[in-house]
Image: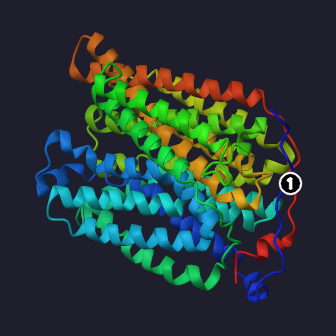
Amino acid sequence: MTEQSTHVATAGPAPAGATRSQRHPGLVLAIVLICQTMFILDTNVVNIALPDIQRDLGFSAAGLSWVLNAYMLAFGGLLLLGGRVGDIVGQRRALIGGVIIFTVASLAGGLATSAGTLLAARAGQGVGAAIAAPTVLALITVGFPESARRARALGAYAAVSGSGAAIGLIAGGMLTDWISWRWVLFVNVPIGVVLLILAPLFIAETDRHPGRFDLAGSLTSTLGMSILVYGFIRAAEQGFGDVVALGALGVAAVLLVLFVAVESRARQPIVPLRLFADRNRAGGYVVLLFVLAAGNGMFFFLTQFLQQVRGYSPLQAGFAFVPLALVILVSSGVAARLLSRLGAKTLIGVGAGAISLALLWMTRMTPQSDYATALLGPMMTAGLGMGVLLVGATTVLSSGIRAEDAGAASGLLNVMQQIGGALGLAVLVTVFGAATRASRGPAHQILTEGVTAAFTVAAVFTAGAILLALTMKNRPAPTVEPAAAEELTR
């Protein structure tokens, strides 16, 4: 693969509002990070509310999982297309359009009186998130010079991305216990309204890159990604030996191969294949997939252990993740300051190493493991690794991107997060099931052995991330002209 290009497209003359905009870069960053937080939270915030949702709306045990799956399927399936939408129509326009869809769907979900209505609303949330989420990193990529300001912005992005799952568990427990499960959806409405007021005022439109729409690429990517996510969801529920799961994964593989063939010939592809030409960036995508596969499984199985073995209430289990979330917030900020000195490769390697250590540490759990003495240490170590690694990985994946590819690159990063999470959960649930079937003893002992087996395999994922980090090169960050930053705000 070729070395990383330092070419970054620069903007033309700043828009009329640019002078005023330079006084508000922090507000622009806050707007896009609130969007990111909202979309990440919605992946996990309903987890703790599921029993109440089942009771109120009459979901079957099998159908209940689709409260999560409907969102994941729409979000993951449309991300590649959503990322390119921002490049074509403008990032601000895509952000606003996605937030409108997400907010309306959240309101509909909170008002739902039947299972079908709630599932349709959750799918609508996924559509809105798929359009708006890629604009977050795209606006940071184009809007902040690759310097100290960009490092701080990427540190904040990494902090939000890394701590979102933990915050979602906490928020879901609080809203469900203190108010109602409906507020895990209603809470998005006032946030969305505020974003829709602020975004047009403080974020100016980026350059549009219109052209012939890649219809074939859109169809093959959307169908391929949707079926791939469904295949992983099905495998997590039924195992990888399930005929439907295997069939879905096979069809998805064919569609995605066709997608790559189409993109190699398209004049304006959904995913420009030049994004993979750089060795660091290509490796960074795989690192992110491995780490999210391990991290998603860690959150899932720790929650199960705390509630089913240690007897925590949903709210107690949510608050157990507070230290981990705080460590992510702090470590990502520190990593952003050390980025120019240590380089992204070092941060990725150190972060993956810390997560591996934490997972191996947690394989020593027993049914008697106390939170303070046996779990808090590895959880905080994992938080340290996540905060550091995500700063390094996000830097690698957002550096040297052409302005016209910013949305596609951001969409691809989000795809790695979604596919990594779905793949990791499918594999680790399969490992968990095999381990529990082979175990003998009390129920708590069997469940604990399944959890520790899953953590062992998760550590293998992060070991792969360490090996990939060793193949990367530390390079000085390229710079962009200040006008690129001025273009985004007014």
Q: Which of the pair 178/52 is nearer the observer?
A: 52
Q: Which of the pair 75/55 is nearer the observer?
A: 75
Q: Quadrant of residue 435?
A: top left
Tell me what residue is drawn at x 28 percent, y 26 percent: 238
Q: Is residue 47 visible?
A: no
Q: Position of residue 73 (x, y in %)?
A: 38, 47
Q: Is residue 311 visible?
A: yes
Crowd tier of the residue under label 1, counting other residues whose Cα lies within 10 Å: few below 14, some 14–19, many 20 or above? some
Tell me what residue is drawn at x 19 percent, y 55 percent: 53
The kind of residue on which mark 1 rests is His
Q: Position of residue 71 (x, y in %)?
A: 36, 52
Q: Position of residue 213 (x, y in %)?
A: 58, 59
Q: Position of residue 92 (x, y in %)?
A: 60, 73
| Quarter of the image with the N terminus in it | top right
Tell me what residue is drawn at x 29 percent, y 22 percent: 242
Q: How many marks?
A: 1
Tell me what residue is drawn at x 49 percent, y 39 percent: 419
**Residue to which mark 1 is pinned:** 7
| Quarter of the image with the C terminus in it | bottom right
Q: Element type at marker 1?
A: loop
Q: Which of the pair 144/48 is nearer the observer?
A: 144
- The image's colour scheme reads rainbow
Q: Is residue 383 above or below residue 349?
A: below
